[in-house]
Structure formats: structure tokens, C-alpha cells
Amino acid sequence: INPKPAYRRILLKLSGEALMGSEGFGIDPSVLGRMALEIKELVELGVQVGLVIGGGNLFRGEGLAKSGMNRVVGDHMGMLATVMNGLAMRDALDRAYVNARLMSAIELTGVCDSYNWSDAISNLKGGKVVIFCAGTGNPFFTTDSAACLRGIEIEADAVLKGTKVDGVYDSDPAQNPDANLYSELSYAQVLDQELKVMDLAAFTLARDHGLPIRVFNMNKPGALKRVVMGQNEGTVIHK
Ligand code: UDP
């Protein structure tokens, strides 16, 4: 049997925290290398991969603002943190012999390309992984918003949100050992039950454009491939 992937084009969102491994800060090269190999498997299956990386392992505007920094400046630092993660991920993909482009929402001549919609689409069609960094380019947004925005722009079949937990639960699994994992939810259920999936701006953008969101555990080896092969993994949120 040679089962086909369930998706033709995906937008994979990895939080900055997913890259830091067991360290409390920064980027763990072994984690990065493993993720590059997991992404490579998808490319080999013929899946087109857009990637949005967070920056929470380095800086978050909200956190910096709590210590007194101007929020806009803090958000600029957060967005630049996602560029650093993006550079590290592109390098890890290069080393794994995966063709990848890094496109930034903030112009950084000589460091990476600037985001351009039609170039992104042609690169995806050419089998290159396109990493979108610097979030949306605007303060007061998150990289989850960037993931939904880019996901809609590139007409991805779904946003796959790689997290530290297995999916969406009815209560916090870190607090409640009896928390139940949902395998499927509607956008309305998430909003009614105030379940934590993404911030509201990101979530309603996905809902308004009918973009399915799948939350899964990126630390579980092979989970990403199972998601892409349409196997039961994590939680899917759709209409
Ligand atoms: N950020 C921003 N605008 C965006 C995306 C991100 O200002 O469109 C800033 C914001 O300060 C955020 C930080 O970049 O906290 C890192 O992104 P995020 O917190 O989404 O990273 P993650 O939690 O996914 O690691």
C-alpha cells in the first residue's frame, strides 16, 4: 500500500518554545535537526510546506513590556527573534538537503528575502519549503495570526499547529490528570467553551476563511507525518 497524503499544501506553525528543547531559552540544535528531518519526509511525499516560526524562545513583546519596555519596541524584538529562528531553521533544512527559502515580513536586505506572495507560491509549487518570518510585520499580533494569514494567502489546506501537548483538551492537562483530548471540534465549540487554541484574532481569521486548524504534539516523533497522512492525531478544528 502507498497511501496518499491528506494535504496538498500545508502551513506548519512551530512555536519558538518547540525549538528550545529542554533548555529554558534559545535553540536546541538537536531539536532543530529532528524537525528538519520530519519536514523533509513531508517534502518527499510531495506535500508543499509553508512554515511559520514563533519567537517565544527568545523574546515576546508582552513579556518585555511587563519589565517596562515600550510594547511596540518589544514586539519589534519579538519579530526579529522569529527571524533568528527562521535563519536557524533554514540552515537546518539546508543541512538536511531540503531546499528552503526564508521570507521576512520586515525587509532585511542581505539576510533573507522579503515576503512576496507570488514568489512564495512559485517556490511552494517548485517543492521548496518557504519559511515565513517576522510574523505579520506588525506589533500587537502573534505568529499564530501570521500562520493563519499566510495559510489563507497561500491557500493551504490547513494550518498545523505543533505544540508541546497532544491537542486541545477540555481542561489544562498540566493541572488536571483527567483532562480529555478532543479529536474534532467546530469553530463555534471552541469559542463557546472558551477552549485555548490560538489568540482570538488568529482564530477568527481562520474561522472566517474556513481554514481548518490542527493542533498536535511536535515533540512526539512521527506525529507530524501521521497528521499529514490523515491519521488520527491531535485535534482538528473546522466548520
Ligand atoms: N510578534 C509581533 N507581530 C507578529 C508576530 C509576532 O509583534 O505579527 C512579536 C510579539 O512580540 C510576539 C513575538 O513576536 O510575542 C514572538 O511571537 P509569538 O509570541 O507568537 O511566538 P511563539 O509563542 O509562537 O513562540
Image (cartoon, rainbow, N blue to C red):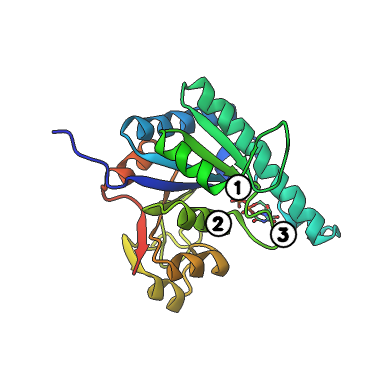
Q: Which percent across, then down, holds residue 194?
A: 48, 74
The residue shown at (38%, 60%) is 212
- Could you say which disc has been placed on residue 54 in the image? 1
Direction bottom: furthest residue? 192
Which residue, given by chain and number where applicable, does mark 2 sit on?
144
Direction left: furthest residue? 1
- Name the residue type under label 3: Pro
- Do residues under tags 3 and 1 come within 8 Å of each other at their CB atoms? no
Kindly tell me whether residue 21 is visible in this rendering: no
Q: Is residue 92 above or below residue 22?
A: above
| Residue 186 sits in quarter | bottom left
Is residue 94 found left or right of 59 in the rendered image?
Answer: left
Q: Nearer the viewer, residue 44 or 213?
A: 44
Is residue 93 found left or right of 141 in the rendered image?
Answer: left
- Count neighbours of disc 2 (C-alpha within 10 A) and say few if under 14, some if 14 to 19, many if 20 or more: many
Mark 2: C-beta under 8 Å from nearest atom of ligand 1: yes
Callout 3: helix, strand or loop?
Answer: loop
Q: Nearer the viewer, residue 11 or 165?
A: 11
Which residue, given by chain and number where applicable, does mark 3 sit on?
139
- Name the residue type under label 1: Gly
Distance from label 1 to label 2 (Cα)? 8 Å
Mark 1: C-beta under 8 Å from nearest atom of ligand 1: yes
- Do residues under tags 1 and 2 come within 8 Å of each other at their CB atoms? yes
Callout 2: helix, strand or loop?
Answer: helix
| Chain-order first, disc 3 or disc 2 | 3
